[in-house]
Every structure is written in C-alpha cells, then in structure tokens.
Image: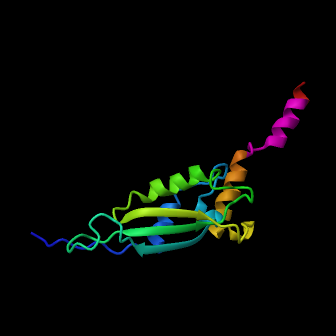
Amino acid sequence: MHPAVPAAPLTEADVLAALRDCYDPGSPLNIVDLGLVYSIAIVPDPDAPGAGIPGVPPRQRVRIALTPLRLADTESDAAPLIAQIQNRLAAFETIHRTEVSLLNHPVWTPDRISPEGYARLAHHLTSKRPPNALVQIKDHRAKT
C-alpha cells in the first residue's frame, strides 16, 4: 500500500484557471480574460473544520478582489457573479471559504483585457455577423 501523497499547495494559477469558467453576465469573455480579477490572496483558514489537528490537511481562505466591469455595479448587482465564483472554487477540497470584494478603484478599462480575450472577442463578434450579409441583402433586392 502506498502512503498518502499530500496534495500540492493551492496556487494563484490554480485559482485563475478555475475562474476562467466564470463569466460576467452579458459578456462573452470570462472574468480572467476580461481583466476583472485584480488580486488573489490564498491564506490558511484557522476557522476551517479540523484546523490545527495533526493529520488534517490545511484548508485555505481565498480572497479575490474584482474591478467591476460597469462603474454602477454594486454588491447586489454583482451577487450572481460572486455566487458563480464561490460555487466554482467550492470544487477545491482545500478551499474552505471564498471571499469576493468589489473595488471602486481602479476603474476597469479595455486595456485590462488579455491578448487571448481580445482574440476570443474578435472571433465572437465576427461569428455573430452572417457571412456575406451585404451580398445576401443585395441579391434579395435584385429579385424583387
């Protein structure tokens, strides 16, 4: 029988990868590629069940600061997105609690969109336009 291998410590990269599954309502991009994630802190959670008991794996508290996409967003406006983030990170056994806060500053700008996000956004916008739309309109007018 093999001894239990301790789980690798949770990293910011792990959290960012998971947050790529979370989308701001009305946007085709995930919150990471949009640049809404301003900071991530992973700290031990002394309030987690079993904390401090030898042999019980430590659990973390994750604190995420978001820059809202829209200036008028409040905690209640962002509640669905915050719930989406908390539910996604609940899949990690090592995370006991996820806290999400909205920042008033810095203000989000399109400069925060990642290069991958720009590529996805460009693809999304071109895929919504019917191919040869102008040709189809011209052909339709010619037939009438």
Q: Is residue 131 magenta?
A: yes
**98 on left or right of 74:** left
Q: Which residue is at 74% across, 56% downward?
A: 72
The image quadrant where one finds the N terminus is bottom left
Quarter location, residue 59? bottom left
Q: Is residue 94 magenta?
A: no
Write down the region rendered in magenta. Answer: 129-141
The secondary structure that dominates the magenta segment is helix
Q: Is residue 19 above or below residue 12?
A: above
Q: What colour scheme has been applied to the protein in the rendered image?
A: rainbow
Residue 11 can be seen in this image: no
Which residue is painted at 80% across and 41% down in the image? 133
* x then y, percent, for residue 127: 69, 48
- In the image, farthest residue toward the top: 144
Give the percent coordinates (x, y) of residue 114. 64, 69
The location of residue 108, given as percent across then percent down, is: 72, 66
**28 left or right, relative to 49:** right
Vertical comparison of 21 with 94: above or below = above
User: Considering depth in this image, is 142 or 29 the residue closer to the camera?
Assistant: 29
Towards the viewer: 44 or 89: 44
Quarter location, residue 82: bottom right
How many marks do you count on the picture? 0
One can see residue 10 in this view: yes
